[in-house]
């Protein structure tokens, strides 16, 4: 990676300085990106947010200039690396605007978008710009240790992955991490099929439709599958890998290991050293990876195409639920979308 002292970063979407009282939804991911740039020694020169209060607050924190719209910021600033931390329905437009202004590296928050046509459009219009999707847990413990533990054969062959996203979260807002993580841990290719069952009531979060409850199953190759369950009835968040020789569960920053080779063989300290800490924010690592992959011209696990696969799996799950059957991948019908204009058989009351 080039000397970070020469790079100029910007952020679209600051979010509020603090979460709303009583809310478990942070709305402040832009602040996390700003902290990550600071950790890397990269200057944040500009912040854009439609809320002047939010833009000014983060600009004051970082010493950057504040803008009320991203177009003006892109026109007036020279930017090397950009974080897009707005709602998913806005990501593609903002990434294309940045690419047209010569920004070379863009890290977009997950999920990439809320529909497939816009992703297809993005892929064909970027030119030399690289876009990455911030599935930052690929760079965090305990997941990095789990990937090495599995790759080194301690679980034997991976048979299945089971993930839960409870506390009212949905596939797009939180489950996307588990969709990506299942593929990461199992070292899985793009899936051949997806199946979904969704309780759709017309609820909206972050500008797109979400399920009230859901079950998503998708192919991991070699006769394996991953299952992600979401909704209000579930009171946990975690992911479990079932292998031929044992089971590994990752939840709440902890590791539960049931394997032939027990932890007294030093495996836990080898793969999850105490001094590394669990669930450390991986955004700085995602930014570093994006910049290095751009500079070296190499593929990355958080590349646009990998983020696109995670999104397509989720959207295929919605399509499967609506059609009432398994769907083949890649989706032939690219019109599937979660923008609120999508008609649902029994629409309910949308919520914030």
Image (cartoon, rainbow, N blue to C red):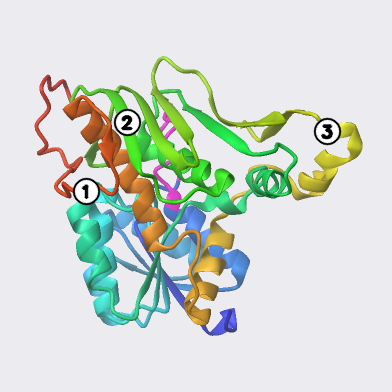
Residue plotted at (23% across, 73% down): 125
Q: CA distance from mark 2 to mark 3?
A: 34 Å
For label 1, the residue is 115
Viewer-nearest of labels 3 and 1?
Answer: 3
Q: Residue 257 location, x and y as percent?
A: 74, 29
Residue 25 location, quadrant: top left
Residue plotted at (57% across, 83% down): 2
Asked whether the viewer can see residue 23, the reply is yes
* N-term mark: 1 or 2: 1
Q: Is residue 258 left or right of residue 329?
A: right
232 or 16: nearer the viewer: 232
* N-term mark: 3 or 1: 1
In this view, the residue farthest toward the front is 222
For label 3, the residue is 261
Q: Read off the magenta span.
A: 18-29
Q: Residues within 10 Å of mark 2 (few under 14, many from 20)?
A: many
* N-term mark: 2 or 3: 2
Residue 94 vertical position relative to residue 104 in the rendered view, above or below: above
Q: CA distance from mark 1 to mark 2?
A: 18 Å
Q: Residues within 10 Å of mark 3 (few under 14, many from 20)?
A: some
Q: Which mark is residue 186?
A: none
Residue 350 vertical position relative to residue 130 in the rendered view, above or below: above
For label 2, the residue is 195
Name the magenta segment's main secondary structure. loop
Q: Judge whether residue 26 is colored magenta.
A: yes
Q: Secondary structure at mark 3?
A: loop
Disc 1 to disc 2: CB gap under 8 Å: no
């Amino acid at each position: 990676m080039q000397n970070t002292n020469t790079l100029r970063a910007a952020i679209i979407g600051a979010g509020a300085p603090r979460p709303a009282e009583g809310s478990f939804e942070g709305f402040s991911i832009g602040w996390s990106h700003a902290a990550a740039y600071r950790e890397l020694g990269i200057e944040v020169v500009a912040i854009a947010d439609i809320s002047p209060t939010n833009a000014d607050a983060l600009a004051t924190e970082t010493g950057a200039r504040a803008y009320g719209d991203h177009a003006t910021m892109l026109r007036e600033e020279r930017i090397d690396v950009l974080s897009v931390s707005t709602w998913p329905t806005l990501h593609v437009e903002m990434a294309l605007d940045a690419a047209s202004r010569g920004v070379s590296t863009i890290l977009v928050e997950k999920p990439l978008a809320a529909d497939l046509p816009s992703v297809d459009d993005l892929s064909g219009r970027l030119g030399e710009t690289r876009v990455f999707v911030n599935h930052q847990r690929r760079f965090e413990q305990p997941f990095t240790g789990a990937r090495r533990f599995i790759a080194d054969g301690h679980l034997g062959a991976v048979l299945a992955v089971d993930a839960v996203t409870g506390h009212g979260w949905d596939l797009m807002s939180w489950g996307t991490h588990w969709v990506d993580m299942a593929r990461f841990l199992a070292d899985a290719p793009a899936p051949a099929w997806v199946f979904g069952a969704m309780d759709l009531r017309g609820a909206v979060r972050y500008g797109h439709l979400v399920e009230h409850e859901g079950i998503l199953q998708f192919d991991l190759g070699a006769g394996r599958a991953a299952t992600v369950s979401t909704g209000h009835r579930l009171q946990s968040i975690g992911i479990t890998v079932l292998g031929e020789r044992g089971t590994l569960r990752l939840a709440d920053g902890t590791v539960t290991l049931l394997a032939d080779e027990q932890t007294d063989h030093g495996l836990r300290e080898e793969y999850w050293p105490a001094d590394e800490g669990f669930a450390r924010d991986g955004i700085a690592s995602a930014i570093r990876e994006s910049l290095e992959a751009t500079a070296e011209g190499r593929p990355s696990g958080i590349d646009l195409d990998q983020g696109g696969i995670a999104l397509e799996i989720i959207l295929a799950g919605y399509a499967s639920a609506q059609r009432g059957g398994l769907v083949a991948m890649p989706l032939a019908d690219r019109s599937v979308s979660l923008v609120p204009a999508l008609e649902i058989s029994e629409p309910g009351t949308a919520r914030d």
